[in-house]
Image (cartoon, rainbow, N blue to C red):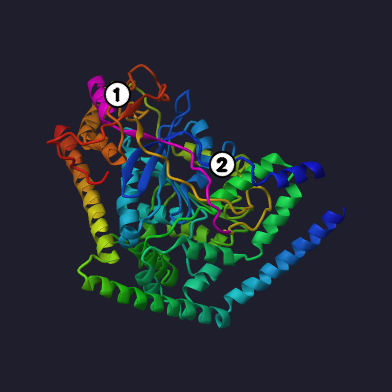
């Protein structure tokens, strides 16, 4: 009985708090600084990453981005080969029909 | 009851992890990180002629649609007689930051549809897109409707500028998606999850209270843990995909306005002319009802329906209640648009089917294991039952790969002379596939192919006892593989 009463009270509190939080999180006054902060953090990280990559490149080593590009190129090649295989098998099937 | 609750709560840490995604399935296609899973048909064979392809969101794991026995949509559809496929988008690596929206929606989704549809003579599939997956299927369907028999979108956003929290956050001044993507590359799941968490910050507390309230119920507890396992098993998003998704859809809201394009082709939702059902949910705080339901007004189908149901984004789709109410409606929709049954018994070219069985590798999919706890992920508001609540749980490990099965390539073989030709043409495509195992370091072969489907049975039947084939660890010398890194 006590639990049930407490739970009802909790549910009401939770509902009201969620609504209040939603209105806060919708407010441009809250969102704009948060968005700007995220962007500023990203810009800082980007500058740091760039500096490290430049230093790494100076030693003649492939950067993280170089490796990512190479791996992606391999994946793209795989996909395009499969595309070609598909087209070829479709053409062969049509020819036989 | 109190004692049981106490015992269950105390033993929560040692409680066996729920078996999520445990419906038996085989990997029938694998490309980059994504896989196409084929759930094994029921023992008595399939009842419907058109396969069903499930397209989940890229942000969460696919097994939300195969949560656990009794609460698995995939399992339910298999038992109802469908031939079910599901896309597992996998976990993007750092190099996948360059994967574009076109790669995913045009190339990969298109491939999955083609692979699944080629299993049947009429070469069409039913689609089911859940959440972001629904948006992707709608976009793909508008550009490539040829192989789609019908489509259901579950809580799929179509109108993005809807005043919801997600819409406001992505449109806020100061948020620069380009800087974010250029810096992070692959957008980390932690960032995405924290955004979902902020949709309803009190949800964690609410779930904890619900757990205390119903801890005596073992069934509730298992469902709760399974859903939390899934909810905390998020996936990072490829950067270029995310950039386009946010800019073109959330910020410009270009899909409804007809300003969105896929692989150079304008996406006009009016080109969707196949039967379509859009399902939205009353208490969905991720995709508000009108954002999902608007699809029906925008498409050109003659047969279309909008179903607005009570419940939250997840609870209404994956729960016991959903199994009794939503799933039968989905089945009825697909059944109404199934292809007509075959009239004549097909003749299968046995030699071709045996040859295909020899070369097609199928990997058994094992249930993911819950491991490290991560963080909270809110998605559900109401009702506060087992299916709608989530707690911290863990990530999943990818299924180990060296064991591959070999059986007839499809439980439903291409039928008739045309089907035999199709199988022959597919043979060339599949011939190099066993070499894929080389990458997994599999052992030398010990092959015993399963028997192909033979004329004389009216319906497709489930494969017999699985035969395990260990594939060669190295590619045969002098026979270059036409596929890279598979």
Look at the image and tell me whether residue B300 can be seen.
no
Label 1 environment density (alpha carbons within 10 Å; few <14, some 14–19, many ≥20): few
Picture layout, residue B359 above or below residue B230: above
State the residue in front, B149 or B99: B99
Q: Position of residue B281 (x, y in %)?
A: 59, 55
Q: Position of residue B197 (x, y in %)?
A: 57, 63
Question: Considering the image in quadrants, where does the C terminus of chain B appear?
Answer: top left
Identify the image quadrant of residue B405.
top left
Q: Secondary structure at mark 2?
A: helix
Proximity of marks 2 and 1: CB atoms separated by less than 8 Å = no
Q: Is residue B351 magenta?
A: yes
**Span of residues in magenta:** B349-376
Q: What numbered label is drawn on residue B446?
A: 1
Q: What numbered label is drawn on residue B327?
A: 2
Q: Are marks 2 and 1 on the same chain?
A: yes
State the residue in front, B116 or B29: B29
């Amino acid at each position: 009985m006590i639990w049930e009463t407490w739970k009802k009270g909790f549910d009401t509190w939770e509902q009201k708090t969620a609504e209040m939080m939603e209105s806060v999180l919708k407010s441009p006054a809250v969102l704009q600084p948060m968005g700007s902060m995220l962007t500023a953090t990203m810009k800082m990280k980007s500058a740091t990453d760039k500096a490290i990559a430049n230093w790494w490149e100076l030693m003649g080593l492939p950067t993280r981005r170089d490796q990512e590009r190479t791996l992606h190129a391999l994946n793209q090649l795989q996909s395009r080969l499969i595309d070609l295989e598909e087209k070829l098998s479709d053409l062969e099937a049509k020819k036989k029909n | 009851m109190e004692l049981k609750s106490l015992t269950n709560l105390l033993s929560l840490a040692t409680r066996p992890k729920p078996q999520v995604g445990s419906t038996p399935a085989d990997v029938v296609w694998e490309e980059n990180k994504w896989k196409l899973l084929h759930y094994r048909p029921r023992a008595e064979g399939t009842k419907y002629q058109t396969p069903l392809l499930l397209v989940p969101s890229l942000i969460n794991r696919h097994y939300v649609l195969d949560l656990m026995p009794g609460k698995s949509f995939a399992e339910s559809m298999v038992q109802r007689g469908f031939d079910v496929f599901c896309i597992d988008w996998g976990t993007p690596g750092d190099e996948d930051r360059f994967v574009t929206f076109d790669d995913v929606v045009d190339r990969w989704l298109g491939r999955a549809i083609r692979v699944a549809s080629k299993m049947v003579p009429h070469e069409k599939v039913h689609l089911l897109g859940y959440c972001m997956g629904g948006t992707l299927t709608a976009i793909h369907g508008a550009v490539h409707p040829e192989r789609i028999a019908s489509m259901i979108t579950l809580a799929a956003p179509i109108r993005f500028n809807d005043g919801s929290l997600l819409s406001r956050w992505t449109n806020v001044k100061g948020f620069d998606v380009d800087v974010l993507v250029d810096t992070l590359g692959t957008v980390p799941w932690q960032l995405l999850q924290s955004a979902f968490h902020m949709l309803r910050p009190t949800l964690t507390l609410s779930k904890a209270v619900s757990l205390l309230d119903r801890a005596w119920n073992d069934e509730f507890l298992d469902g709760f843990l399974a859903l939390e396992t899934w909810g905390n098993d998020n996936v990072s998003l490829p950067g270029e995909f995310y950039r386009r998704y946010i800019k073109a859809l959330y910020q410009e809201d270009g899909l409804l306005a007809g300003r969105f394009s896929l692989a150079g082709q304008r996406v006009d939702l009016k080109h969707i002319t196949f039967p379509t059902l859009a399902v939205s949910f009353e208490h969905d705080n991720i995709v508000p009802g009108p954002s999902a339901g608007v699809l029906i007004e925008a498409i050109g189908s003659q047969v279309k329906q909008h179903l607005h149901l009570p419940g939250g984004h997840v609870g209404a789709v994956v729960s016991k209640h959903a199994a009794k109410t939503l799933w039968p409606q989905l089945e009825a929709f697909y059944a109404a648009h199934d292809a007509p049954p075959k009239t004549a018994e097909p003749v299968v070219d046995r030699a071709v089917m045996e040859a295909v069985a020899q070369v097609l590798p199928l990997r058994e999919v094992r249930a993911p294991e819950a491991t490290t706890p991560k963080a909270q992920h809110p998605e559900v508001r109401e009702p506060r039952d087992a299916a709608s609540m989530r707690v911290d749980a863990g990530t999943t490990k990818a299924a180990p790969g060296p064991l591959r099965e070999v059986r007839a390539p499809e439980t439903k073989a291409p039928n008739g002379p045309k089907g035999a030709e199709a199988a022959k043409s597919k043979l060339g495509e599949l011939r190099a596939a066993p070499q894929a195992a080389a990458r997994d370091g599999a052992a030398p072969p010990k092959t015993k192919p399963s028997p192909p489907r033979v004329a004389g049975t009216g319906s497709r039947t489930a494969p017999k006892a699985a035969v395990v084939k260990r594939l060669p660890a190295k590619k045969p010398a002098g026979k270059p593989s036409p596929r890279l890194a598979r």
